[in-house]
Amino acid sequence: MARLWLSEGIPSIFCICPAIYDSLRCWIAECLEVKAKEIGLVGSAQLGKSLDPCKLGTPFIDRRSDLDFFIVSSNLFAKLKEDFECWSDDFKGGRLSAYNRERRFWKSNLKRSSNNINRGFIDANTIPSFPEYPTAEKIQKIMELLILRLKNTKDAPKPQKASIRCYTSWDSFVQQKSLNLRHLAEQVRKQL
């Protein structure tokens, strides 16, 4: 916990239960074979309020808000990229069919994830949670278990769902966060 407090800060939603956050990070790290220090939270869970231009200032609300984790790991990124490429080939090649609603999301996810990979990150939840894509499936199961763990833990936040965005490097993380903040500043200026 000293490491967490000294070098990273404690996310807003875990301010009364920092040991729970540290325990979750260590558990995720062990499950995904990364270091706990490579895992963090962003968004309203981290700051207490949303920085999304559409929801600016909206507080984190139990049972309605999400936990948006990030992991900086070139190894995990490579595994997710491989899953994405397999899924992309399966979907484009017609070896995988989707329901109408899924098809719309999948087409969007193909384009968006390709662009994001080129910028050094990928959202694990854009890849279907199927056995053919083992890393994405494993992450989805971990996130589902995490929600159950929090639901059954006294004094812990109760988010609606959780997701992981994986960055290939700290440079990619900083670049994306900087881009997000510039976009936010532009949106705020437009509203003034």
Image (cartoon, rainbow, N blue to C red):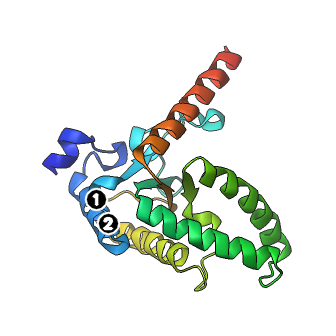
Residue 133 figure quarter: bottom right
Whether residues under marks 1 and 2 lie with C-beta atoms below 8 angstroms apart, the answer is yes
Left/right placement of residue 25 relative to residue 165 reads left
Residue 132: x, y in percent? 61, 84
Left/right placement of residue 23 relative to residue 160 reads left
The residue depicted at 57 percent of the width and 34 percent of the height is: 180
Task: Answer whether residue 43 is visible to the viewer in this image.
Answer: no
* Disc ID at residue 29: 2
Residue 12 figure quarter: top left
Residue 40: x, y in percent? 37, 51
* Residue at the limit of the structure toward the top, as seen here: 192
As displayed, is residue 158 above or below residue 96? above
Residue 16: x, y in percent? 25, 48
- The kind of residue on which mark 1 rests is Ala
Task: Answer whether residue 66 is visible to the viewer in this image.
Answer: yes
Mark positioned earlier in the residue sequence (1 or 2): 2
As displayed, is residue 62 above or below residue 105? above
Q: Label 1: how many residues lie within 10 Å, few (<14), some (14-19) or many (20+)?
A: some
- The kind of residue on which mark 2 rests is Ala
The residue depicted at 16 percent of the width and 51 percent of the height is: 1
Where does label 1 land, which residue?
Answer: 36
How many badges with numbers are in the image? 2
Q: Which quarter of the figure is the C terminus placed in? A: top right
Left/right placement of residue 170 relative to residue 185 reads left
